[in-house]
Image (cartoon, rainbow, N blue to C red):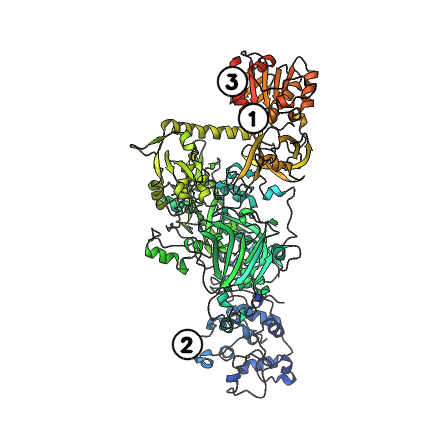
């Protein structure tokens, strides 16, 4: 199939005419190629004597044909012949005279000189194929239909204009033409040299020479900037007066290279790259394996998420963006774990195997009356599809996979909020990501339901609705888009089941998400379970009240005008906005200026657009927008789809000299699109803070000696303070209320932490927000996650999300202020906790289990130690290079084990009994857990123990650590609550499974050479069978007699024959007999059931002289 562009090159751009050589199609090729081009007379009939009756390649028009004087019995051979035949004597004669001498090179020449003519009148190419080569005004007048004459109705109000100039006719070459010396033979003013990139697919094709930025239009893609081709030959560039500087020439070279890249684009096939991958060793590149402590108390507790994401709406729901530097550094396909997340509520917990997609139509549409109006609906039948139907191995539909960018319409809202708070929380500029989305085309799914494409295009408008399975404060999340948009195969609207080669992540819609390329993220419904055709647009709450661009003058959602505008179809945001952002330099980056100020610094960033429109130009300014430098674009693989669609973002870069940065005050970026629209200079405030795409400005400030600059973005990462745009005064924290308010202590607040009694602390004031929970637009869990807590985060998060209306409702809930001591404790606590965490994370770097995220551990084996106690061995996840994961738990510390309920995680602390010493690390750890079986007194039984007891090998739990305040450092040295202490003798009081931390201590001391610390243990259990690790303990007691002494006590009823220990409750006397007496270098540690500790151990040890916090501690 010949290339279209080759035959019908577009008209010259910026006065650049296209030059030879062209591949000129034969008439047959033309006919074959374009269905609508009908040759009236077959070439064969030009035959004998060259007496064609009419010019080949003209059109027939059945009605006008009769009027034609030359008409004879020739019948059009094809249907749809639309136009009048036009005879052209001279052309006929010329054609006849040269019928055997058809010389393509002549044709090429004519074509090359008159591309406009060819383009405008492509169907007349055969006139120009006249090998006599010189086109006369006769040819033109007679060879080109006079539509004013032929179709006066549609051409009434303008004169006929011939598509050539006199100069063009006269400038043709003919044999013997005298050449003027003064440049007649040169291209005319509007014929600057051509562009002909080499090696760009079909070799001879042309690239339109619109250079980017400062580049010159119409330079030759295969040329170097010095005007020579790569093969050494020179072209017309040589003849141009070019006083470009070397820098300009180098830039032009880059422009040419970029043009070659553009020319090399082939249409993306959309063919998936192999089957979806299971979780494999390299999964960590895409997916986070850990769940977050932040999510532990929320319904999202089961979702692994990246800690590096900046959460913008508190703990729940998850709304987060990647750090811009990380997002950019990760490349053009965003790893799934860095993809921005926009959730309105809890993520529904769905399964691939049970999830169904229901496809139906409003009942009102499935009637005979409607079928008469819209025949395409007649055979439509509601259907349900399983995930296997949609994306399984034997899926019904061919999968399509394409790189597509999705962005939140609120991206860069932080800047809008910095002008005046809008009704939306502050995104930075990273609420955008690109994935390889894989799915079934919605069009195919609808056709499989019997929908026919011959919908009545002129009749009533139909919409396709999508609904997600999530349940939110205002019901379901649904939206609608025009059905015809979906049915257009060029729009690639899909129901995606794959993201970056694996199934979708729960935050991104697992198992099924609608992806509407070029549309805003808010229309790409996640967790889709329903899709239906209607003749009405969606009235869903989120369709009406979200994703709208409301005029600036509307500042209050409640007015009549506001309500009208929120329901207005033209305020709804579908297509994404044109956007560009600077990523390098990053916020806070210190740019050290080298001695050579002419050295190059490369500014970088990304740009994207909606509706598939190309981002055609990106420019930066270093002087506040007075002058602009062109940037070069980098594209994803296969960026082009359907000839014109660009579904993915571009990265861009621009080399600047350090001296330019020093002179400039800021770096500003803007992009242009395929319609030559450019981003606006200023932010246009609107009540939802949507679609801010004003020039992105990064300010540069001098940063001391040696000379450096520091970059400040408008909004700091995570919408924290520190960007150059300061928050408006109204946004600043209100601070503590003053006056006669009632004062509450932290302990008092902490008591109100449930769904039906919920207090929170904001701005050091206390609020009873129980009444807000039932209507809270962010869901009750967003607030209860902070209930009763002394967390400074609550205030920060609250203010980043809410508008004045929320503030007024909040004020109604204020019940007093936090006590001065409470405020101090809260602030200090926040600081200390953060510092401790960072220290611990550093210490545990490289270990499998971290303090602030949960990693998974798989059950390897379970051993029944007694009727209700099991020894569980769990495998830790391997390291990224495949080595066994290490627990690295300090002696005396614990891990937190979790599994997931739908509202929150169930967590318990355990002390693994192995590995204790580094040499015992083998990628696994052992937990000794007692199960409180369901019984008549407490039928549900203990939650965690029973969960573990029925766990199958290979099933998972979540683990984090280390936790606990006591760490044994060896040789009698401890770190207890941050303070180092030393004891030469240690008393241990254990009850039941409280033995495990004691075991760690005993084992660490006794198995370490040179550790002479003496240990005495009293272990209290109900029966001898309940004694954990009895053999190991007794072995140590035998083998290390002088260093370790062991005493058991059991219930009096359980005393077996020959029992040589106690059979009674623990008491002071027993402790005095079997433990070391209280001295400065003797400490006592306890762990066991609360009753045993509070009623027996603590009073007994105190009576012996041990002091709480000095020589007496609880694990
Ligand atoms: C006095 C207590 C509160 C009141 C009266 C309140 C009120 C509101 C209102 C009216 C909205 C709708 C958005 C807007 O128009 O501003 C909202 C949204 C929201 N609120 Fe609150 N809120 C309260 C406390 C909190 C707290 C403590 C948090 C957690 C830090 C929170 C998290 C959220 C979230 C996540 C949204 C949804 C944001 C979105 O998805 O667009 N709220 N709240």
Query: In the figure, 1056 relative to 400: above or below?
Result: above
- Decide which of 450, 547 is in the foreground and name it: 450
> In whole angstroms, how far apart are the C-alphas of marks 1 and 2?
101 Å
Q: Nearer the viewer, residue 93 or 1080?
A: 1080
Which label is found at residue 922? none
The one nearer the camera, 1021 or 952, is 1021
Residue bearing the label numbered 1? 1089
Q: Position of residue 973 (x, y in %)?
A: 57, 17
Q: Earlier in the sequence, mark 3 or mark 2?
A: 2
Disc 3 element: helix
Residue 116: image x %, image y %? 50, 69
Badges 3 and 1: C-beta atoms under 8 Å apart? no
First in residue order: circle 3 vs circle 1: 1
Q: CA distance from mark 3 to mark 2?
A: 110 Å
Query: Where is mark 2, residue-wise?
Result: 159
- With respect to residue 407, does 730 lie above or below? above
**Label 3 to label 1: alpha-carbon separation:** 15 Å
Q: Is residue 724 visible in this depiction of the protein?
A: no
| Residue closest to the far left | 739
Placement of the N terminus among the 4 image quadrants = bottom right
- In-image side of 939 versus 536 (left or right): right
Observer-side mark, 1 or 2, equals 1
Secondary structure at badge 2 equals: loop
Quick one: label 2, few (<14), some, or many (20+) residues within 10 Å?
few
Give the residue at mark 3: 1099
Q: Position of residue 565 (x, y in %)?
A: 37, 57
Quadrant of picture, ligand 1: top left
Q: Residue at x 52, y 36 (%)?
A: 293
């Amino acid at each position: 199939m010949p290339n279209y562009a080759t035959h019908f090159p577009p008209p010259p751009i910026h006065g650049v005419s296209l030059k030879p050589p062209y591949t000129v199609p034969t008439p047959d090729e033309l006919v074959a190629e374009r269905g609508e081009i009908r040759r009236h007379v077959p070439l064969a009939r030009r035959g004998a004597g060259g007496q064609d009756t009419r010019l080949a390649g003209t059109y027939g028009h059945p009605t006008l044909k009769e009027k034609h004087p030359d008409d004879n019995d020739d019948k059009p051979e094809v249907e749809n012949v639309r136009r009048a035949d036009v005879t052209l004597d001279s052309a006929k004669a010329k054609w006849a005279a040269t019928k055997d001498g058809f010389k393509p090179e002549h044709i090429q020449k004519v074509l090359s000189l008159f591309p406009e003519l060819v383009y405008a009148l492509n169907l007349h190419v055969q006139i120009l194929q006249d090998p006599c080569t010189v086109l006369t005004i006769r040819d033109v007048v007679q060879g080109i239909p006079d539509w004013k004459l032929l179709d006066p109705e549609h051409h009434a109000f303008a004169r006929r204009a011939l598509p050539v100039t006199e100069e063009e006719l006269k400038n043709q070459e003919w044999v013997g033409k005298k050449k003027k010396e003064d440049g007649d033979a040169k291209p005319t003013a509007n014929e600057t040299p051509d562009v002909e990139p080499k090696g760009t697919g079909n070799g001879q094709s042309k690239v339109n020479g619109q250079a980017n930025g400062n580049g010159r239009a119409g330079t030759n893609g295969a040329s170097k900037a010095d005007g020579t081709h790569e093969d050494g030959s020179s072209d017309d560039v040589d003849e141009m007066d070019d006083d470009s500087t070397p820098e300009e020439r180098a830039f032009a070279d880059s422009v040419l290279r970029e043009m070659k890249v553009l020319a090399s684009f082939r249409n993306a096939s959309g063919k998936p790259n192999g089957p979806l991958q299971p979780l494999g060793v390299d999964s960590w590149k895409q997916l986070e394996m850990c769940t977050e402590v932040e999510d532990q108390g929320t319904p999202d507790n089961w979702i692994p998420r990246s800690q590096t994401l900046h959460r913008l709406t508190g703990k729940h729901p998850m709304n987060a963006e990647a750090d811009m530097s990380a997002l950019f550094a990760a490349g053009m396909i965003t790893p799934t774990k860095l993809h921005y997340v926009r959730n309105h509520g809890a993520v529904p917990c769905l399964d691939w195997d049970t999830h169904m997609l229901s496809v139906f139509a409003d009942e009102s549409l499935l009637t005979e009356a409607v079928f008469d109006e819209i025949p395409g609906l007649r055979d439509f039948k509601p259907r349900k599809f399983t995930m296997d139907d949609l994306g399984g191995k034997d899926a019904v539909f061919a999968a399509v996979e394409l790189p597509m960018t999705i962005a939140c319409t609120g991206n860069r809202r932080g800047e809008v909020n910095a002008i005046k708070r809008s009704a939306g929380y502050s995104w930075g500029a990273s609420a955008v990501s690109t994935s390889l989305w894989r799915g079934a085309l919605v069009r195919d799914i609808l056709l499989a339901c019997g929908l026919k494409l011959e919908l009545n295009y002129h009749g009533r408008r139909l919409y396709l609705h999508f609904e997600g399975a999530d349940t939110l404060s205002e019901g379901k999340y649904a939206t609608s888009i025009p059905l015809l948009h979906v049915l257009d195969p060029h729009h690639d609207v899909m129901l995606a089941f794959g993201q970056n080669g694996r199934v979708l992540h729960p935050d991104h819609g697992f198992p099924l998400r609608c992806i509407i390329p070029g549309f805003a993220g808010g229309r790409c419904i996640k967790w889709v379970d329903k899709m239906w055709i209607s003749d009405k647009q969606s009235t869903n709450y989120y369709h009406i009240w979200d994703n709208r661009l409301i005029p600036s003058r509307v500042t209050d959602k409640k007015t009549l005008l506001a309500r009208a505008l929120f329901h207005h179809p033209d305020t709804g945001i579908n297509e994404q906005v044109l956007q560009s952002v600077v990523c390098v330099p990053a916020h806070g980056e210190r740019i050290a200026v080298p001695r050579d100020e002419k050295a190059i610094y490369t500014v970088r960033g990304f740009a994207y657009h909606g509706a598939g429109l190309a981002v055609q130009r990106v420019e930066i300014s270093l002087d506040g927008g007075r002058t602009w430098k062109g940037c070069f674009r980098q594209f994803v693989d296969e960026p082009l789809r359907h000839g014109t669609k660009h579904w993915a973002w571009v990265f861009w870069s621009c080399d600047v000299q350090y001296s330019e940065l020093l002179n400039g005050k800021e770096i500003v970026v803007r992009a242009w699109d395929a319609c030559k629209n450019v981003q606006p200079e200023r932010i246009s405030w609107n009540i939802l803070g949507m679609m801010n795409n004003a020039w992105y400005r990064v300010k540069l400030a001098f940063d001391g000696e040696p000379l450096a600059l520091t970059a400040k973005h408008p909004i700091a990462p995570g919408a924290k303070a520190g960007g150059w745009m300061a928050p408006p005064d109204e946004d600043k924290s209100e601070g503590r209320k003053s006056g006669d308010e009632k004062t509450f202590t932290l302990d008092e607040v902490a008591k109100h932490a449930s769904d039906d009694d919920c207090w929170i602390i904001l701005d050091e004031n206390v609020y009873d927000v129980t009444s807000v929970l039932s209507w809270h637009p962010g869901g009750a869990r967003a607030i209860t996650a902070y209930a009763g807590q002394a967390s400074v985060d609550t205030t920060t998060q609250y203010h980043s999300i809410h508008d004045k209306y929320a503030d007024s409702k909040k004020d109604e809930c204020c019940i007093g202020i936090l006590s001065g001591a409470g405020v101090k404790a809260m602030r200090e606590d926040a600081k200390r906790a953060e510092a401790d965490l960072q220290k611990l994370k550093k210490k545990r770097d490289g270990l499998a289990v971290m303090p602030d995220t949960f990693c998974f551990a798989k059950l390897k084996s379970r051993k029944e130690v007694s009727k209700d106690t099991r020894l569980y061995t769990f495998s830790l996840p391997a390291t990224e290079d495949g080595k066994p994961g290490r627990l690295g738990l300090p002696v005396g510390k614990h891990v937190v084990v979790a599994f997931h309920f739908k509202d929150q995680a169930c967590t318990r602390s355990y002390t693994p009994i192995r590995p204790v010493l580094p040499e015992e690390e083998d990628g696994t750890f052992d937990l000794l857990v007692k199960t409180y079986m369901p019984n008549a007194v407490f039928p549900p039984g203990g939650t965690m123990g029973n969960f573990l007891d029925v766990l199958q090998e290979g099933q998972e739990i979540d683990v984090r650590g280390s936790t606990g305040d006591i760490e044994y450092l060896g040789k009698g040295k401890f770190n207890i609550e941050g303070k180092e202490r030393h004891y030469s003798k240690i008393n241990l009081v254990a009850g039941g499974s409280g033995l495990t931390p004691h075991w760690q201590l005993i084992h660490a001391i006794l198995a370490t050479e040179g550790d002479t610390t003496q240990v005495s243990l009293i272990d209290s259990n109900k029966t001898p069978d309940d004694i954990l690790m009895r053999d190991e303990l007794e072995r140590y007691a035998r083998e290390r007699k002088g260093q370790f002494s062991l005493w058991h006590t059991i219930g009096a009823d359980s005393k077996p024959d020959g029992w040589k220990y106690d059979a009674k409750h623990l008491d002071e006397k027993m402790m005095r007999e079997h433990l070391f007496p209280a001295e400065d270098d003797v400490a006592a540690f306890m762990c066991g059931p609360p009753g045993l500790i509070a009623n027996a151990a603590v009073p007994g040890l105190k009576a012996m002289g041990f002091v709480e916090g000095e020589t007496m501690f609880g694990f």
